[in-house]
Amino acid sequence: MPLSAAPRLGTFNGFGRTMLGKTRVDAAGACFATRWFTMLMLPIRPLGRYYVKEGETVSVSGRAGASTDTTEYVFLGEAELRASEVIRTYLFCWVVVPLVVAGPVTLFGINADAFSRAHPVWFLVLLLGLPVVGIIALAWLLVLNEKFLAPLRVPEWGEARPTNRRA
C-alpha cells in the first residue's frame, strides 16, 4: 500500500525508532524492513513494516568527538507485519547476539581463576580477544543473514484496507 508520508525514525543512546529485520534486496534494489521501537538498541515493539530502498549512510560529528551514523531510507510502501520476521528479529537480538558476544566470555570466566594462574599470558589474550572475536562473528552473522538467509519478498500491491480509526 503506498504511503502518504514517511514514518519518523531516529534513536538517541539506543532509545527510539529504527529499521530492523530486513529481507534480501530484490531486483529493484528495495527490501522489506520493520520499524521497531528500541531500548538500548534492543527491539521492544514492532511499529510497522515497509518496502524501502536504503540510501546512503552519513556520519555526523557531535560534541566531544562523538559521531553517529545516519542511514537514509526511501519509503516506497507499507505492508502488513509478518509474524515470522518479528520472531526472527526478536530471536536474533535477544538470543543470538547475547550468546555470540557474552557466551564465550561467560564460559571462559567459569575457569578463569585456575587458568589465570597457570597461563597468565594466554589468560590476558583470551580475556581481551574473546569479546573481539564475538563482535566479529556477530558482524559476519549480520552480513550472512542480509545476503543469504533473509527471505526474498516481492511486493504485491493491493487495495488500501479501510481502517477502524475514528476521526
Image: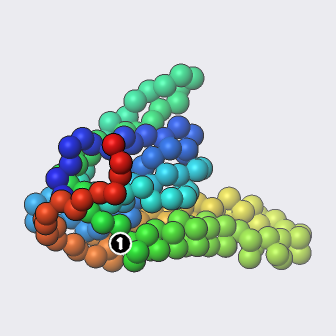
- Above or below: residue 121 compared with residue 52: below
Residue 141, picture quadrant: bottom left
Residue in front for this viewpoint, 106 or 146 = 146
Towards the viewer: 45 or 72: 45
**Residue sitting at the far left:** 28
Q: In the orientation shown, which residue stands out farthest toward the top? A: 63
Do we see residue 45 in this rendering? yes
Please name the residue shown 43% across and 40% down the image.
Answer: 10
In the displayed structure, does residue 56 sit left or right of residue 40? left
Asked whether residue 53 is in view, the answer is no
Q: In this orientation, which residue lies closer to the viewer: 15 or 114?
A: 15
Residue 4 versus residue 165 in the image, above or below: above
Q: Residues within 10 Å of mark 1 (few under 14, many from 20)?
A: few
Q: Which residue is mark 1?
A: 82
Considering only vertical position in the picture, is 17 above or below 149? above
Q: Residue 21 appears in which quarter of the rendering?
A: bottom left
Q: Is 33 placed left or right of 142 in the picture?
A: left
Q: Is the N terminus in the top left, top right, bottom left or bottom right quadrant?
A: bottom left
For the point 51% across and 59% down, the residue is 45
Which residue is rendered at x = 52% and y = 73% of the image? 91
Image position, residue 36 (x, y; %): 45, 55
Which of the 4 quarters of the picture holds residue 94?
bottom right
Please say if 71 is above or below 138.
Answer: above
